[in-house]
């Protein structure tokens, strides 16, 4: 299965890179405030669904662009054809394909492919991998850490608490980064390029794959209440065990 999925993601990634210079303003739609989509998102999702059905013919889907209505609560894929669509449409390279396979309401496999870098992050019951090489998350302390996040871009009622948290983390870490793709942020947190990640108001397809990769790399993933509602809920916090607990304390000091 994993070899077929790798080939599928690389094929779709090549299509995305080929089409990136061709997307025009007239081919971009705004689904809602600052939520962009193009024909590349739609076609990529159709390719994903078709390819994954050949690999797992009984699976259902939870998809961002809603190109399929196939459902199966016992086995289903959560897929994002392009996470970082705004980056993609503005000619940046930090975008990816993110997929996660759920069985019995639990993740059993995940993959995040970054086409421009030819990097494939995967996770299964045995661990987390980058291009087939097993890895674990970092062990850095908060004062030595680099933290990833995403800025609110369509919902602003928690902005003050968010900015207050940014200020505290700026003063207690080596820095903050905003990549523009939650899936990449999570993959990098799993791999140790970041030590922690937090964000508000994401969707399941943004985080399902990356959250499982972080966990299989030895990291911790929760919501802002230290609970398990981070895929279908409103908040996510991921990091190595020491970073996670310290960031959770900072979050709890704010009124999210």
Image (cartoon, grey):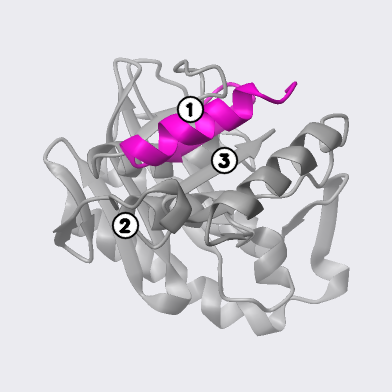
| Residue for point 38% across, 69% down | 11
Q: Residues within 10 Å of mark 2 (few under 14, many from 20)?
A: many
Residue 237 drawn in magenta? yes
Instruction: Give residue 233's position: percent from left, percent from top.
Output: 59, 21
Q: Is residue 212 visible?
A: no
Residue at disc 3, secondary structure: strand
Residue 191's disc is 2
Q: Residues within 10 Å of mark 1 (few under 14, many from 20)?
A: few
What distance separates the C-alpha of mark 1 from that of mark 3?
A: 31 Å
What distance separates the C-alpha of mark 3 from that of mark 2?
A: 16 Å
Q: Earlier in the sequence, mark 1 or mark 3?
A: 1
What distance separates the C-alpha of mark 1 from that of mark 2?
A: 33 Å
- For the C terminus, the quadrant is top right
Q: Residues within 10 Å of mark 3 (few under 14, many from 20)?
A: many
Question: Foreground: 184 or 172?
Answer: 172
Of tags 1 and 3, the one toward the viewer is 3
Instruction: Give residue 90's position: percent from left, percent from top.
Output: 74, 74
Q: Which residue is mark 3?
A: 198
**Is residue 247 toward the left or the right of residue 113 in the image?**
right
Residue at disc 1, secondary structure: loop
Residue 229's disc is none
In magenta, the rendered stretch is: 231-256
Quarter of the view holding residue 180: bottom right
Instruction: Give residue 188's position: percent from left, percent from top.
Output: 41, 58
Question: Foreground: 164 or 208?
Answer: 164
Q: Earlier in the sequence, mark 1 or mark 2?
A: 1
Residue 241 drawn in magenta? yes
Q: Earlier in the sequence, mark 3 or mark 2?
A: 2
Q: Which residue is mark 1?
A: 70
């Amino acid at each position: 299965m994993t070899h077929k999925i790798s080939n599928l993601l690389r094929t779709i990634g090549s299509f995305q890179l080929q089409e990136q210079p061709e997307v025009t303003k007239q081919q971009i739609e705004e689904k809602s405030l600052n939520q962009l989509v193009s024909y590349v998102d739609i076609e990529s999702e159709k390719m994903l669904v078709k390819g994954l059905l050949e690999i797992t013919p009984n699976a259902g889907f939870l998809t961002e662009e809603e190109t399929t209505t196939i459902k199966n609560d016992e086995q289903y894929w959560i897929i994002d054809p392009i996470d970082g669509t705004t980056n993609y449409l503005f000619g940046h390279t930090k975008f990816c394909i993110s997929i996660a396979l759920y069985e019995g309401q639990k993740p059993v496999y995940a993959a995040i492919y970054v086409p421009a870098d030819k990097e494939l992050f995967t996770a299964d019951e045995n661990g987390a991998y980058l291009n087939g090489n097993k890895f674990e998350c970092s062990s850095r302390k908060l004062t030595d850490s680099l933290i990833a996040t995403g800025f609110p871009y369509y919902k602003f009622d928690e902005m003050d608490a968010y900015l207050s948290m940014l200020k505290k983390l700026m003063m207690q870490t080596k820095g903050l980064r905003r990549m523009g793709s939650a899936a990449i942020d999570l993959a990098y947190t799993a791999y140790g390029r970041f030590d922690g990640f937090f964000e508000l108001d994401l969707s399941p397809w943004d985080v399902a794959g990356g959250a499982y990769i972080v966990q299989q790399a030895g990291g911790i993933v929760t919501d802002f209440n230290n609970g398990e509602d981070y895929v279908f809920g409103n908040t996510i916090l991921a990091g190595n065990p020491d970073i996670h607990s310290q960031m959770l304390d900072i979050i709890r000091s704010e009124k999210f």
